[in-house]
Amino acid sequence: METIKNTVQAVMQSWETKLKPGSPSSEPPESLLKKLLTKKEFGHIKFRYLRKGIMGITTDSSPWLYYFSLHKDKLLEQLHKSGYSLKDIRFYIGEIE
């Protein structure tokens, strides 16, 4: 019985270390963006990737690319508060499905 208790404690501790600030939160990036952005803003983007601390987001037009580029620092700050340690966000123009 003691072995099960130790195993459960070890698993719980590993989950806690994974969710400390500076490491990705348990929430997927796309749903987190949905919470951080307005409905109108979210309708003009599509999350593409998260690799090596860089998040890739596709926008549907150049005006929205410019808009998000202006607000990139604020978005990065909000993502840091949510537990993602990102170096940069890269925006691209492309098709939004």
Image (spheres, rainbow, N blue to C red):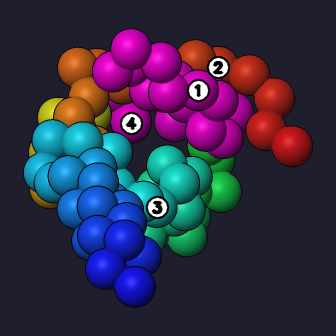
Residue 6: in magenta span: no
Q: Callout 1, which amino acid?
A: Tyr
Disc 3 to disc 4, C-alpha distance: 25 Å
Mark 1 residue crowding within 10 angstroms, few (<14) / some (14–19) / many (20+): some
Residue 61: in magenta span: yes
Of circles 3 and 4, the one toward us is: 3
Disc 4 to disc 2, C-alpha distance: 12 Å
The circle drawn on residue 27 is: 3
Of circles 3 and 1, the one toward us is: 3
Q: Secondary structure at mark 4?
A: helix
First-in-chain label (3 vs 4): 3
Q: Callout 2, which amino acid?
A: Ile
The circle drawn on residue 93 is: 2
The circle drawn on residue 67 is: 4
Q: Position of residue 10 (x, y in %)?
A: 29, 61
Span shown in magenta: 46-71
Disc 4 to disc 1, C-alpha distance: 20 Å
Disc 3 to disc 1, C-alpha distance: 15 Å
Q: Is residue 62 visible?
A: no
Residue occupied by mark 1: 49
Q: Callout 3, which amino acid?
A: Glu
Q: Which residue is more in the foreground, 74 or 30?
A: 30
Quadrant in the rendering for residue 73 = top left
Of circles 1 and 2, the one toward us is: 1
Q: Secondary structure at mark 3?
A: loop
Left or right: 51, with 7 as reference point = right
The circle drawn on residue 85 is: none
Q: Callout 4, which amino acid?
A: Tyr
**Number of numbered discs present?**
4
- Circles 4 and 1 in contact, beta carbons < 8 Å: no
